[in-house]
Image: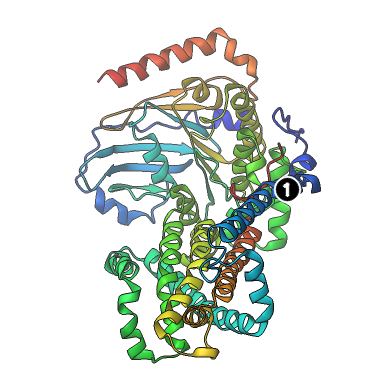
Amino acid sequence: MTATQTVDAPTAAALASPVKREQSGRLRKMLPPLIVLVLFLGGWWLISATLYGDKNYLVPRPMQVVQAALDNPGTLLQGTWITLTEAAAGFALAIFVGLLSAIVMSLSKALEHSFYPYAVLLQTVPVVAVAPIIVLWFGYNQQSVIVISFMIAVFPILNNSLLGLLSTDRNHVDLFRMHRAKKVTEFVKLRLPGALPSIFAGLRISAGLSVIGAIVGEFIIGSGGEQGGLGVKVLFAQSRLATGLLFAEVVAATLLGFAFFLIVSVAGNQLIKNWHESVVRRND
Amino acid sequence: MNLRRSAHIDHAVALSPDYGTVGVVASSSATETSVTAGAHIDVRGACKTYPNGTIALQPVNLQISKGEFVSLLGPSGCGKSTLLRVIAGLSAPTQGDVKIPAGDRRAFVFQDPTLLPWRTVEGNAHLVCELEGVGKAERRTRVAEALKMVGLTGFEQVYPRNLSGGMKMRLSLARALALRPQLFLMDEPFSAVDEITREGLQDELLRIWGSEGFTSVFVTHNLYEAVYLSQRVVVMSARPGRIKKIFDIPFDFPRRPVLRSTHEFAALSAEISHYLREGMDE
Protein backbone atom coordinates (compact mmCIF):
# COMPACT_ATOMS: atom_id res chain seq x y z
CA MET A 1 0.00 0.00 0.00
CA THR A 2 1.57 3.26 -1.05
CA ALA A 3 1.25 6.26 1.17
CA THR A 4 -1.70 8.45 0.40
CA GLN A 5 -1.03 11.87 -0.98
CA THR A 6 -2.87 14.43 1.04
CA VAL A 7 -3.10 17.75 -0.69
CA ASP A 8 -5.59 19.18 1.73
CA ALA A 9 -4.11 18.08 5.02
CA PRO A 10 -2.89 20.49 7.67
CA THR A 11 -0.95 18.82 10.47
CA ALA A 12 -2.97 16.79 12.92
CA ALA A 13 -1.33 18.42 15.92
CA ALA A 14 -2.44 21.86 14.79
CA LEU A 15 -6.03 20.69 14.55
CA ALA A 16 -6.14 18.70 17.76
CA SER A 17 -5.32 21.47 20.25
CA PRO A 18 -7.54 24.54 20.11
CA VAL A 19 -5.73 27.79 20.80
CA LYS A 20 -6.22 28.74 24.43
CA ARG A 21 -7.67 32.16 25.05
CA GLU A 22 -5.19 34.49 26.67
CA GLN A 23 -5.69 35.86 30.15
CA SER A 24 -5.61 39.49 28.92
CA GLY A 25 -8.34 38.70 26.41
CA ARG A 26 -10.58 37.49 29.20
CA LEU A 27 -10.04 40.71 31.12
CA ARG A 28 -10.75 42.80 28.05
CA LYS A 29 -14.03 40.95 27.67
CA MET A 30 -15.09 41.59 31.25
CA LEU A 31 -14.33 45.30 31.21
CA PRO A 32 -17.35 46.59 29.18
CA PRO A 33 -20.04 44.99 31.39
CA LEU A 34 -18.15 46.21 34.48
CA ILE A 35 -18.25 49.77 33.14
CA VAL A 36 -22.00 49.42 32.56
CA LEU A 37 -22.45 48.17 36.14
CA VAL A 38 -20.56 51.14 37.59
CA LEU A 39 -22.57 53.58 35.45
CA PHE A 40 -25.82 51.89 36.54
CA LEU A 41 -24.98 52.07 40.24
CA GLY A 42 -23.87 55.70 39.82
CA GLY A 43 -27.15 56.62 38.10
CA TRP A 44 -29.14 54.80 40.75
CA TRP A 45 -27.30 56.63 43.51
CA LEU A 46 -27.84 59.96 41.75
CA ILE A 47 -31.59 59.41 41.41
CA SER A 48 -32.09 58.20 44.98
CA ALA A 49 -29.91 60.97 46.40
CA THR A 50 -31.43 63.85 44.43
CA LEU A 51 -35.05 63.01 43.44
CA TYR A 52 -35.84 60.85 46.47
CA GLY A 53 -33.43 62.37 48.93
CA ASP A 54 -36.19 62.68 51.55
CA LYS A 55 -38.05 59.52 50.57
CA ASN A 56 -35.41 56.82 50.85
CA TYR A 57 -38.10 54.30 51.74
CA LEU A 58 -39.14 54.48 48.06
CA VAL A 59 -35.72 54.37 46.41
CA PRO A 60 -32.95 53.44 48.81
CA ARG A 61 -29.39 54.27 47.89
CA PRO A 62 -27.12 51.42 46.81
CA MET A 63 -25.23 51.55 50.10
CA GLN A 64 -28.46 51.33 52.06
CA VAL A 65 -29.29 48.12 50.24
CA VAL A 66 -25.86 46.71 51.05
CA GLN A 67 -26.28 47.85 54.65
CA ALA A 68 -29.69 46.14 54.87
CA ALA A 69 -28.13 42.95 53.56
CA LEU A 70 -25.32 43.13 56.10
CA ASP A 71 -27.77 43.82 58.92
CA ASN A 72 -29.98 40.83 58.08
CA PRO A 73 -27.65 38.08 56.85
CA GLY A 74 -29.72 35.35 58.50
CA THR A 75 -32.98 36.44 56.86
CA LEU A 76 -31.36 36.67 53.42
CA LEU A 77 -29.48 33.38 53.64
CA GLN A 78 -32.47 31.50 55.02
CA GLY A 79 -34.81 32.94 52.37
CA THR A 80 -32.33 32.20 49.60
CA TRP A 81 -31.80 28.67 50.87
CA ILE A 82 -35.52 27.90 51.03
CA THR A 83 -36.18 29.34 47.57
CA LEU A 84 -33.14 27.47 46.26
CA THR A 85 -34.40 24.10 47.51
CA GLU A 86 -37.89 24.74 46.12
CA ALA A 87 -36.59 25.91 42.75
CA ALA A 88 -34.08 23.04 42.58
CA ALA A 89 -36.83 20.52 43.30
CA GLY A 90 -39.15 22.14 40.73
CA PHE A 91 -36.34 22.26 38.18
CA ALA A 92 -35.36 18.64 38.80
CA LEU A 93 -38.97 17.57 38.39
CA ALA A 94 -39.23 19.63 35.21
CA ILE A 95 -36.07 18.01 33.79
CA PHE A 96 -37.34 14.55 34.61
CA VAL A 97 -40.85 15.01 33.27
CA GLY A 98 -39.87 17.26 30.35
CA LEU A 99 -37.07 15.03 29.11
CA LEU A 100 -39.04 11.84 29.57
CA SER A 101 -42.08 13.25 27.74
CA ALA A 102 -39.86 14.51 24.93
CA ILE A 103 -38.23 11.10 24.57
CA VAL A 104 -41.58 9.30 24.54
CA MET A 105 -43.04 11.77 22.03
CA SER A 106 -39.95 11.50 19.82
CA LEU A 107 -40.39 7.73 19.61
CA SER A 108 -43.98 7.83 18.43
CA LYS A 109 -45.66 10.29 16.09
CA ALA A 110 -49.04 9.21 17.41
CA LEU A 111 -48.08 10.04 20.98
CA GLU A 112 -46.55 13.31 19.89
CA HIS A 113 -49.72 14.34 18.08
CA SER A 114 -51.85 13.24 21.02
CA PHE A 115 -49.97 14.98 23.81
CA TYR A 116 -48.04 17.91 22.40
CA PRO A 117 -51.08 20.25 22.17
CA TYR A 118 -51.70 19.72 25.87
CA ALA A 119 -48.08 20.42 26.65
CA VAL A 120 -48.57 23.75 24.88
CA LEU A 121 -51.74 24.36 26.92
CA LEU A 122 -49.79 23.66 30.08
CA GLN A 123 -47.48 26.47 29.04
CA THR A 124 -50.26 28.93 28.13
CA VAL A 125 -52.47 28.36 31.16
CA PRO A 126 -51.91 31.33 33.50
CA VAL A 127 -50.14 29.72 36.42
CA VAL A 128 -51.24 32.47 38.79
CA ALA A 129 -54.86 31.60 37.99
CA VAL A 130 -54.53 27.88 38.65
CA ALA A 131 -52.32 28.38 41.67
CA PRO A 132 -55.30 28.45 44.08
CA ILE A 133 -56.26 24.97 42.87
CA ILE A 134 -52.72 23.77 43.36
CA VAL A 135 -52.75 25.17 46.86
CA LEU A 136 -56.07 23.41 47.48
CA TRP A 137 -54.52 20.14 46.37
CA PHE A 138 -51.11 20.38 47.97
CA GLY A 139 -51.77 22.81 50.83
CA TYR A 140 -50.05 26.02 51.91
CA ASN A 141 -46.61 24.48 51.89
CA GLN A 142 -43.45 23.99 49.90
CA GLN A 143 -44.99 21.23 47.80
CA SER A 144 -47.28 23.75 46.13
CA VAL A 145 -44.34 26.04 45.47
CA ILE A 146 -42.41 23.17 43.89
CA VAL A 147 -45.36 22.25 41.67
CA ILE A 148 -45.75 25.86 40.48
CA SER A 149 -42.01 26.10 39.80
CA PHE A 150 -42.24 22.85 37.86
CA MET A 151 -45.21 24.06 35.80
CA ILE A 152 -43.38 27.17 34.70
CA ALA A 153 -40.10 25.37 33.97
CA VAL A 154 -41.22 22.22 32.21
CA PHE A 155 -42.32 23.44 28.80
CA PRO A 156 -39.05 24.90 27.45
CA ILE A 157 -37.30 21.65 28.37
CA LEU A 158 -39.96 19.52 26.73
CA ASN A 159 -40.18 21.67 23.62
CA ASN A 160 -36.45 22.06 22.98
CA SER A 161 -35.63 18.45 23.78
CA LEU A 162 -38.36 17.22 21.45
CA LEU A 163 -37.11 19.49 18.68
CA GLY A 164 -33.58 18.20 19.19
CA LEU A 165 -34.59 14.56 19.27
CA LEU A 166 -36.63 14.93 16.08
CA SER A 167 -33.89 16.78 14.16
CA THR A 168 -31.74 13.72 13.56
CA ASP A 169 -30.18 13.70 10.11
CA ARG A 170 -32.01 11.37 7.72
CA ASN A 171 -28.77 9.90 6.35
CA HIS A 172 -27.50 9.14 9.83
CA VAL A 173 -30.68 7.22 10.55
CA ASP A 174 -30.24 5.33 7.26
CA LEU A 175 -26.67 4.50 8.19
CA PHE A 176 -27.74 3.11 11.55
CA ARG A 177 -30.66 1.15 10.09
CA MET A 178 -28.54 -0.24 7.27
CA HIS A 179 -26.18 -1.72 9.82
CA ARG A 180 -29.07 -3.19 11.78
CA ALA A 181 -28.69 -0.94 14.82
CA LYS A 182 -31.27 -1.55 17.50
CA LYS A 183 -33.68 1.28 18.37
CA VAL A 184 -31.92 1.67 21.70
CA THR A 185 -28.51 1.93 20.03
CA GLU A 186 -29.87 4.46 17.58
CA PHE A 187 -31.21 6.49 20.47
CA VAL A 188 -28.11 6.32 22.66
CA LYS A 189 -25.49 6.75 19.94
CA LEU A 190 -27.30 9.03 17.53
CA ARG A 191 -30.49 10.80 18.62
CA LEU A 192 -29.56 11.71 22.19
CA PRO A 193 -26.04 13.06 21.59
CA GLY A 194 -27.32 15.00 18.58
CA ALA A 195 -30.09 16.52 20.69
CA LEU A 196 -27.82 17.64 23.54
CA PRO A 197 -27.37 21.22 22.28
CA SER A 198 -31.16 21.66 22.01
CA ILE A 199 -31.79 19.96 25.34
CA PHE A 200 -29.39 22.33 27.06
CA ALA A 201 -30.88 25.32 25.28
CA GLY A 202 -34.17 24.36 26.95
CA LEU A 203 -32.50 23.70 30.31
CA ARG A 204 -30.86 27.12 30.27
CA ILE A 205 -34.22 28.86 29.79
CA SER A 206 -35.89 26.72 32.44
CA ALA A 207 -33.12 27.18 35.01
CA GLY A 208 -34.00 30.85 35.48
CA LEU A 209 -37.72 30.16 35.10
CA SER A 210 -37.71 27.62 37.92
CA VAL A 211 -36.51 30.31 40.35
CA ILE A 212 -39.15 32.73 39.07
CA GLY A 213 -41.74 29.96 39.48
CA ALA A 214 -40.65 29.36 43.07
CA ILE A 215 -40.97 33.09 43.90
CA VAL A 216 -44.43 33.22 42.27
CA GLY A 217 -45.43 30.16 44.29
CA GLU A 218 -44.23 31.77 47.50
CA PHE A 219 -46.21 34.92 46.68
CA ILE A 220 -49.38 32.87 46.34
CA ILE A 221 -48.82 30.90 49.49
CA GLY A 222 -48.10 34.24 51.10
CA SER A 223 -47.81 33.14 54.65
CA GLY A 224 -44.86 31.44 56.22
CA GLY A 225 -43.56 34.67 57.68
CA GLU A 226 -40.07 34.29 59.01
CA GLN A 227 -39.84 30.74 57.73
CA GLY A 228 -40.62 31.47 54.07
CA GLY A 229 -38.45 31.81 51.01
CA LEU A 230 -37.44 35.04 49.28
CA GLY A 231 -40.91 35.60 47.80
CA VAL A 232 -42.50 35.49 51.24
CA LYS A 233 -39.78 37.69 52.68
CA VAL A 234 -40.21 40.26 49.89
CA LEU A 235 -43.93 40.60 50.79
CA PHE A 236 -43.05 40.86 54.46
CA ALA A 237 -40.38 43.54 53.84
CA GLN A 238 -42.84 45.49 51.69
CA SER A 239 -45.48 45.47 54.40
CA ARG A 240 -42.94 47.03 56.78
CA LEU A 241 -41.62 49.51 54.17
CA ALA A 242 -38.19 47.95 54.67
CA THR A 243 -37.24 48.78 51.08
CA GLY A 244 -33.51 48.38 51.64
CA LEU A 245 -34.03 44.78 52.68
CA LEU A 246 -36.63 44.31 49.93
CA PHE A 247 -34.11 45.39 47.30
CA ALA A 248 -31.49 43.13 48.82
CA GLU A 249 -33.91 40.21 48.61
CA VAL A 250 -34.72 40.98 44.98
CA VAL A 251 -31.01 41.06 44.21
CA ALA A 252 -30.58 37.73 46.03
CA ALA A 253 -33.40 36.17 44.00
CA THR A 254 -31.86 37.50 40.78
CA LEU A 255 -28.44 36.13 41.66
CA LEU A 256 -30.02 32.80 42.54
CA GLY A 257 -31.64 32.53 39.10
CA PHE A 258 -28.38 33.58 37.50
CA ALA A 259 -26.50 30.91 39.45
CA PHE A 260 -28.94 28.27 38.23
CA PHE A 261 -28.44 29.44 34.67
CA LEU A 262 -24.67 29.49 35.05
CA ILE A 263 -24.45 25.97 36.47
CA VAL A 264 -26.61 24.55 33.69
CA SER A 265 -24.66 26.48 31.03
CA VAL A 266 -21.30 25.30 32.27
CA ALA A 267 -22.48 21.70 32.55
CA GLY A 268 -23.99 21.80 29.07
CA ASN A 269 -20.98 23.44 27.50
CA GLN A 270 -18.71 20.84 29.06
CA LEU A 271 -20.71 18.11 27.36
CA ILE A 272 -20.62 19.61 23.87
CA LYS A 273 -17.47 21.73 24.02
CA ASN A 274 -15.53 19.62 21.56
CA TRP A 275 -17.90 19.69 18.68
CA HIS A 276 -20.77 22.13 18.79
CA GLU A 277 -20.37 25.43 16.97
CA SER A 278 -21.93 27.39 19.82
CA VAL A 279 -19.17 26.40 22.23
CA VAL A 280 -16.09 25.53 20.22
CA ARG A 281 -13.32 28.06 20.52
CA ARG A 282 -12.29 29.54 17.26
CA ASN A 283 -8.70 29.55 16.20
CA ASP A 284 -8.80 32.98 14.64
CA MET B 1 -6.42 -6.92 -11.02
CA ASN B 2 -6.30 -7.66 -14.71
CA LEU B 3 -7.78 -11.05 -14.04
CA ARG B 4 -10.75 -9.42 -12.47
CA ARG B 5 -11.15 -6.98 -15.30
CA SER B 6 -11.61 -9.68 -17.90
CA ALA B 7 -13.81 -11.79 -15.68
CA HIS B 8 -16.94 -9.81 -16.27
CA ILE B 9 -16.78 -9.55 -20.02
CA ASP B 10 -18.38 -12.88 -20.83
CA HIS B 11 -21.05 -12.12 -18.29
CA ALA B 12 -24.31 -11.45 -20.04
CA VAL B 13 -26.04 -8.21 -19.31
CA ALA B 14 -29.70 -8.59 -18.67
CA LEU B 15 -31.50 -5.55 -19.84
CA SER B 16 -35.19 -5.67 -20.41
CA PRO B 17 -37.16 -2.56 -19.63
CA ASP B 18 -40.34 -4.34 -20.58
CA TYR B 19 -39.92 -6.91 -17.87
CA GLY B 20 -43.40 -8.06 -16.97
CA THR B 21 -44.63 -7.33 -13.48
CA VAL B 22 -47.07 -10.24 -13.37
CA GLY B 23 -45.80 -12.95 -11.11
CA VAL B 24 -42.81 -11.00 -9.93
CA VAL B 25 -44.04 -11.04 -6.37
CA ALA B 26 -44.05 -14.82 -6.49
CA SER B 27 -40.41 -14.83 -7.49
CA SER B 28 -39.45 -13.10 -4.29
CA SER B 29 -40.22 -16.32 -2.45
CA ALA B 30 -37.45 -17.94 -4.46
CA THR B 31 -34.73 -16.02 -2.65
CA GLU B 32 -33.18 -19.32 -1.63
CA THR B 33 -32.25 -20.20 -5.19
CA SER B 34 -28.62 -19.64 -6.00
CA VAL B 35 -27.68 -16.43 -7.70
CA THR B 36 -26.75 -16.38 -11.37
CA ALA B 37 -23.34 -17.96 -11.78
CA GLY B 38 -20.65 -15.34 -11.29
CA ALA B 39 -23.09 -12.61 -10.34
CA HIS B 40 -22.47 -11.06 -6.95
CA ILE B 41 -25.45 -8.76 -7.06
CA ASP B 42 -28.46 -10.00 -8.96
CA VAL B 43 -31.24 -7.45 -9.41
CA ARG B 44 -34.32 -9.08 -10.86
CA GLY B 45 -37.27 -7.03 -11.94
CA ALA B 46 -36.82 -4.66 -9.04
CA CYS B 47 -39.01 -1.60 -9.25
CA LYS B 48 -40.05 1.12 -6.91
CA THR B 49 -43.33 3.01 -6.82
CA TYR B 50 -43.94 5.47 -4.02
CA PRO B 51 -47.27 5.54 -2.17
CA ASN B 52 -48.22 8.75 -4.00
CA GLY B 53 -47.97 6.90 -7.31
CA THR B 54 -44.62 8.25 -8.45
CA ILE B 55 -42.69 5.60 -10.33
CA ALA B 56 -39.10 6.04 -9.15
CA LEU B 57 -37.83 2.94 -10.88
CA GLN B 58 -39.32 0.73 -13.58
CA PRO B 59 -38.56 -2.97 -13.34
CA VAL B 60 -34.78 -3.31 -13.63
CA ASN B 61 -32.57 -6.31 -14.27
CA LEU B 62 -28.90 -5.97 -13.52
CA GLN B 63 -26.21 -8.48 -12.71
CA ILE B 64 -22.93 -7.34 -11.21
CA SER B 65 -19.98 -9.71 -10.98
CA LYS B 66 -17.87 -10.27 -7.91
CA GLY B 67 -15.17 -7.64 -7.63
CA GLU B 68 -16.60 -5.57 -10.45
CA PHE B 69 -16.71 -1.77 -10.48
CA VAL B 70 -20.00 -0.55 -11.91
CA SER B 71 -21.30 3.01 -12.09
CA LEU B 72 -24.92 4.03 -12.29
CA LEU B 73 -25.01 7.20 -14.37
CA GLY B 74 -27.88 9.47 -15.20
CA PRO B 75 -29.64 12.78 -14.65
CA SER B 76 -31.44 13.51 -11.40
CA GLY B 77 -34.70 11.61 -11.11
CA CYS B 78 -33.48 8.64 -13.17
CA GLY B 79 -33.73 6.31 -10.20
CA LYS B 80 -30.02 5.64 -9.85
CA SER B 81 -30.02 6.45 -6.15
CA THR B 82 -33.22 4.49 -5.70
CA LEU B 83 -31.63 1.46 -7.34
CA LEU B 84 -28.58 1.81 -5.10
CA ARG B 85 -30.75 2.09 -2.00
CA VAL B 86 -32.64 -1.01 -3.06
CA ILE B 87 -29.35 -2.89 -3.47
CA ALA B 88 -28.23 -1.58 -0.09
CA GLY B 89 -31.39 -2.81 1.57
CA LEU B 90 -32.24 0.74 2.64
CA SER B 91 -35.35 0.66 0.54
CA ALA B 92 -37.53 -2.33 -0.24
CA PRO B 93 -38.43 -2.79 -3.90
CA THR B 94 -42.16 -2.58 -4.61
CA GLN B 95 -41.79 -5.68 -6.74
CA GLY B 96 -38.96 -7.94 -7.79
CA ASP B 97 -35.92 -8.63 -5.66
CA VAL B 98 -32.21 -8.27 -5.20
CA LYS B 99 -30.10 -11.33 -4.51
CA ILE B 100 -26.89 -10.95 -2.62
CA PRO B 101 -25.03 -13.86 -0.99
CA ALA B 102 -26.17 -14.17 2.61
CA GLY B 103 -23.68 -12.81 5.12
CA ASP B 104 -21.95 -10.50 2.68
CA ARG B 105 -21.12 -7.20 4.32
CA ARG B 106 -22.51 -4.12 2.60
CA ALA B 107 -21.06 -0.69 3.22
CA PHE B 108 -22.73 2.50 2.05
CA VAL B 109 -21.13 5.87 1.45
CA PHE B 110 -23.52 8.79 1.30
CA GLN B 111 -23.30 11.99 -0.70
CA ASP B 112 -22.66 13.82 2.59
CA PRO B 113 -19.90 12.43 4.77
CA THR B 114 -22.61 11.84 7.47
CA LEU B 115 -20.08 11.97 10.28
CA LEU B 116 -21.10 12.23 13.92
CA PRO B 117 -19.79 15.66 14.97
CA TRP B 118 -19.42 14.60 18.60
CA ARG B 119 -17.04 11.79 17.72
CA THR B 120 -13.39 12.16 16.80
CA VAL B 121 -12.00 10.86 13.51
CA GLU B 122 -11.21 7.60 15.27
CA GLY B 123 -14.63 7.40 16.92
CA ASN B 124 -16.34 7.96 13.60
CA ALA B 125 -14.21 5.34 11.89
CA HIS B 126 -15.29 2.87 14.57
CA LEU B 127 -19.01 3.48 14.13
CA VAL B 128 -20.01 1.06 11.38
CA CYS B 129 -17.97 -1.83 12.81
CA GLU B 130 -19.39 -1.01 16.21
CA LEU B 131 -22.95 -1.24 14.90
CA GLU B 132 -22.15 -4.53 13.18
CA GLY B 133 -20.84 -5.95 16.44
CA VAL B 134 -17.17 -6.28 15.54
CA GLY B 135 -15.14 -6.86 18.72
CA LYS B 136 -13.22 -3.96 20.20
CA ALA B 137 -9.70 -5.28 19.67
CA GLU B 138 -10.47 -6.36 16.12
CA ARG B 139 -12.09 -3.00 15.48
CA ARG B 140 -8.98 -1.10 16.54
CA THR B 141 -6.84 -3.01 14.06
CA ARG B 142 -9.30 -2.50 11.24
CA VAL B 143 -9.83 1.21 11.95
CA ALA B 144 -6.10 1.89 12.08
CA GLU B 145 -5.76 0.06 8.78
CA ALA B 146 -8.67 1.89 7.17
CA LEU B 147 -7.43 5.29 8.33
CA LYS B 148 -4.04 4.45 6.88
CA MET B 149 -5.64 3.49 3.58
CA VAL B 150 -7.24 6.91 3.21
CA GLY B 151 -4.27 8.83 4.61
CA LEU B 152 -5.83 9.96 7.88
CA THR B 153 -3.30 8.34 10.21
CA GLY B 154 -2.28 10.92 12.79
CA PHE B 155 -5.67 12.63 12.74
CA GLU B 156 -7.37 10.15 15.10
CA GLN B 157 -8.18 12.68 17.84
CA VAL B 158 -9.37 15.49 15.55
CA TYR B 159 -13.06 16.37 15.41
CA PRO B 160 -14.81 16.41 12.02
CA ARG B 161 -15.46 20.15 12.16
CA ASN B 162 -11.73 20.70 11.84
CA LEU B 163 -11.44 18.59 8.68
CA SER B 164 -11.61 19.86 5.11
CA GLY B 165 -14.34 18.58 2.79
CA GLY B 166 -11.98 16.11 1.17
CA MET B 167 -10.75 14.77 4.51
CA LYS B 168 -14.33 14.35 5.74
CA MET B 169 -15.13 12.26 2.69
CA ARG B 170 -11.98 10.17 3.19
CA LEU B 171 -13.09 9.55 6.76
CA SER B 172 -16.50 8.52 5.47
CA LEU B 173 -14.75 6.04 3.15
CA ALA B 174 -12.57 4.77 6.01
CA ARG B 175 -15.61 4.18 8.20
CA ALA B 176 -17.06 1.98 5.46
CA LEU B 177 -13.75 0.28 4.65
CA ALA B 178 -13.17 -0.70 8.27
CA LEU B 179 -16.08 -3.09 7.90
CA ARG B 180 -14.06 -4.89 5.18
CA PRO B 181 -17.14 -5.01 2.99
CA GLN B 182 -17.67 -7.39 0.11
CA LEU B 183 -20.02 -4.79 -1.37
CA PHE B 184 -19.13 -1.15 -1.50
CA LEU B 185 -22.06 1.08 -2.40
CA MET B 186 -21.50 4.79 -3.01
CA ASP B 187 -24.11 7.46 -3.65
CA GLU B 188 -22.44 10.41 -5.43
CA PRO B 189 -19.76 10.49 -2.74
CA PHE B 190 -17.48 13.00 -4.45
CA SER B 191 -20.07 15.41 -5.81
CA ALA B 192 -19.61 17.99 -3.06
CA VAL B 193 -15.82 18.34 -3.24
CA ASP B 194 -13.78 20.48 -5.60
CA GLU B 195 -12.45 19.14 -8.89
CA ILE B 196 -8.82 18.64 -7.79
CA THR B 197 -9.79 16.89 -4.57
CA ARG B 198 -12.29 14.78 -6.47
CA GLU B 199 -9.69 13.48 -8.89
CA GLY B 200 -7.42 12.64 -5.97
CA LEU B 201 -10.23 10.78 -4.24
CA GLN B 202 -11.05 8.87 -7.42
CA ASP B 203 -7.47 7.60 -7.66
CA GLU B 204 -7.48 6.65 -3.99
CA LEU B 205 -10.74 4.79 -4.41
CA LEU B 206 -9.41 2.84 -7.41
CA ARG B 207 -6.22 1.99 -5.55
CA ILE B 208 -8.15 0.71 -2.52
CA TRP B 209 -10.58 -1.20 -4.73
CA GLY B 210 -7.60 -2.80 -6.48
CA SER B 211 -6.14 -4.02 -3.22
CA GLU B 212 -9.33 -4.93 -1.36
CA GLY B 213 -11.23 -6.58 -4.17
CA PHE B 214 -14.75 -5.60 -3.14
CA THR B 215 -17.62 -5.21 -5.58
CA SER B 216 -18.34 -1.51 -6.18
CA VAL B 217 -21.54 0.17 -7.21
CA PHE B 218 -20.97 3.87 -7.69
CA VAL B 219 -23.78 6.33 -8.35
CA THR B 220 -22.83 9.56 -10.09
CA HIS B 221 -24.18 12.21 -12.42
CA ASN B 222 -20.65 12.94 -13.59
CA LEU B 223 -20.01 11.17 -16.89
CA TYR B 224 -16.21 11.46 -16.78
CA GLU B 225 -16.09 10.18 -13.23
CA ALA B 226 -18.14 7.16 -14.24
CA VAL B 227 -15.92 6.40 -17.25
CA TYR B 228 -12.69 6.90 -15.33
CA LEU B 229 -13.64 4.65 -12.43
CA SER B 230 -15.72 1.88 -13.90
CA GLN B 231 -15.53 -1.37 -15.78
CA ARG B 232 -19.14 -0.88 -16.76
CA VAL B 233 -21.30 2.22 -16.87
CA VAL B 234 -25.04 1.74 -16.53
CA VAL B 235 -26.75 4.70 -18.21
CA MET B 236 -30.17 5.40 -16.77
CA SER B 237 -32.87 7.80 -17.89
CA ALA B 238 -35.59 9.63 -16.07
CA ARG B 239 -39.36 9.75 -15.85
CA PRO B 240 -39.76 6.94 -15.22
CA GLY B 241 -36.36 5.76 -14.01
CA ARG B 242 -34.96 2.87 -16.02
CA ILE B 243 -31.78 1.40 -17.45
CA LYS B 244 -31.17 2.72 -20.94
CA LYS B 245 -27.90 1.14 -21.96
CA ILE B 246 -24.87 -0.47 -20.41
CA PHE B 247 -21.38 0.39 -21.65
CA ASP B 248 -18.24 -1.66 -21.19
CA ILE B 249 -15.27 0.53 -20.37
CA PRO B 250 -12.25 -1.25 -21.88
CA PHE B 251 -9.39 0.73 -20.34
CA ASP B 252 -6.79 -1.25 -18.38
CA PHE B 253 -6.15 -1.00 -14.69
CA PRO B 254 -4.44 0.56 -12.86
CA ARG B 255 -5.74 3.70 -14.50
CA ARG B 256 -3.70 6.87 -14.47
CA PRO B 257 -4.96 10.47 -14.53
CA VAL B 258 -3.44 10.85 -18.00
CA LEU B 259 -6.19 8.54 -19.26
CA ARG B 260 -8.59 11.46 -19.04
CA SER B 261 -6.80 13.27 -21.85
CA THR B 262 -6.60 10.37 -24.29
CA HIS B 263 -8.55 10.25 -27.51
CA GLU B 264 -10.20 6.95 -26.58
CA PHE B 265 -11.45 8.37 -23.30
CA ALA B 266 -12.93 11.38 -25.08
CA ALA B 267 -14.55 9.24 -27.77
CA LEU B 268 -16.19 6.88 -25.32
CA SER B 269 -17.32 9.78 -23.14
CA ALA B 270 -18.86 11.45 -26.18
CA GLU B 271 -20.76 8.31 -27.08
CA ILE B 272 -22.14 7.90 -23.56
CA SER B 273 -22.92 11.59 -23.44
CA HIS B 274 -25.04 11.13 -26.55
CA TYR B 275 -27.14 8.47 -24.83
CA LEU B 276 -27.42 10.59 -21.72
CA ARG B 277 -28.84 13.52 -23.69
CA GLU B 278 -31.25 11.28 -25.50
CA GLY B 279 -32.47 10.04 -22.15
CA MET B 280 -33.13 13.57 -21.00
CA ASP B 281 -35.05 14.68 -24.08
CA GLU B 282 -37.65 11.99 -23.79
Residue A181 appears in the rendering: no
Q: At which x and y percent is residue A237?
A: 52, 80
Foreground of the two, B80 or A142:
A142
Q: Which residue is mark 1?
A: B156
Q: At which x and y percent is residue B100?
A: 45, 49
The subunit carrying tag 1 is B
Quadrant in the picture for the C terminus of chain B? top left
Q: Residue at x 23, y 48 (%)?
A: B51
Q: Is residue B162 above or below residue B6?
A: below
Quadrant in the picture for the N terminus of chain B? top right
Q: At which x and y percent is residue B14?
A: 36, 33
The amino acid beneath tag 1 is Glu
Bin the neighbour count of mark 1 within 10 Å (Cα to Cα): few under 14, some 14-19, many 20 and up.
Answer: some
Foreground of the two, A122 or B157:
A122
Q: Residue at x 36, y 29 (%)?
A: B76
Apparent side of residue B88 relative to residue A62 in the rendered image (left or right):
left
Residue B35 appears in the rendering: yes
Apparent side of residue A94 relative to residue A111 in the rendered image (left or right):
right
Give the number of callouts.
1
Q: Is residue B277 above or below residue A207?
A: above
Q: Report the residue that reaches farthest toward the front.
A: A54
Kind of element beneath mark 1 = loop
Foreground of the two, B216 or A223:
A223
